[in-house]
Image (spheres, rainbow, N blue to C red):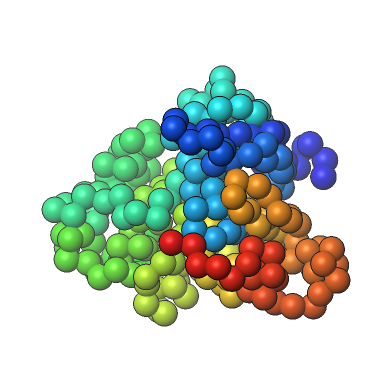
Amino acid sequence: MSTDNIAIDIQDLTKYYRGFEKPAIDRISLRIGESSIFGLLGPNGAGKTTMIRILCGLLIPTGGKVMIGGYSLRNELTEIRRIIGVVPQEIALFPSLTARENLFIFGGICGLKGSVLKQRINELLSTFGLERSQGMQVGLYSGGMKRRLNLIAGLLHKPRILFLDEPTVGVDVQSKSVIMENLVEINRRGTTIVYTSHYLEEAESFCSSLAIIDEGVIITQGSLNDIRKEYKSDAGLEELFLELTGKNLRD
């Protein structure tokens, strides 16, 4: 992969938490291509969320080098935050405010204002089917509506790179369909997506490349076809995942 086509370049990334001898992330190296949909998959406690939090600038790594959009995570975090969007697994909204009020706050944080912000809010509320409920308090929203609004908040400033942590967890089928269809379109327009999920059937159809992580280490990476060739298998992603990470429960 040419360095000109790399959205995220990670070299020997390591993270130790205080009080633990074993690293949560253990010298991980990988490259994520521009305009790709990259799936970071693994069982509970594998290190996925730690890695996403580091890439978003929410955790300081113990070691390693990370470049995001051509900027150094260590030295140019302000520039990185301008080009990334983050949609956390937790619903990061103000329940006592309306959808529109929430989006004006998040848009302001991203540096948007005035007619530009208003137009962007109108566009995304319409795209994700929330225009008719925009004046309702978010605390009264269904789970699927909250997920869609959570996603909109991360898309307001048209990020070059979008981080999604379990974007469809706990949502109804209709909301999931709207979310996934629009993410595919957003990617088609050039946004790089980094995505974590436990829904392996969804990941299999959504991701152009992926990595399976367990105990802080990348077990395998590449397209699904690359991984099948590596392990001489024609199995689906879920079967391969269980083969590589085992069937023991991870609570």
Q: In which quarter of the image is the C terminus?
A: bottom left
Name the residue rendered at 56%, 38% in the picture.
23
Q: Nearer the viewer, residue 241 or 149?
A: 241
Q: In which quarter of the image is the N terminus?
A: top right
Is 201 on the left or on the right of 234, as rendered?
left
Q: How many marks?
A: 0
Is 59 on the left or on the right of 35, as rendered?
left
Q: Is residue 136 above or below residue 65?
A: below
Residue 186 x %, y %: 55, 58
Residue 144 x %, y %: 33, 70
Q: Which of 15 and 83 is in front in this view?
A: 15
Residue 125 can be seen in this image: no
Name the residue rendered at 69%, 33% in the picture.
12
Q: Is residue 172 above or below residue 8?
A: below
Residue 113 x %, y %: 32, 37
Residue 90 x %, y %: 34, 54
Name the residue rendered at 59%, 71% in the picture.
247
Is 113 on the left or on the right of 29, as rendered?
left
Residue 220 can be seen in this image: yes
Q: In this view, does 161 lie above or below 66?
A: below
Name the residue rendered at 31%, 37% in the picture.
108
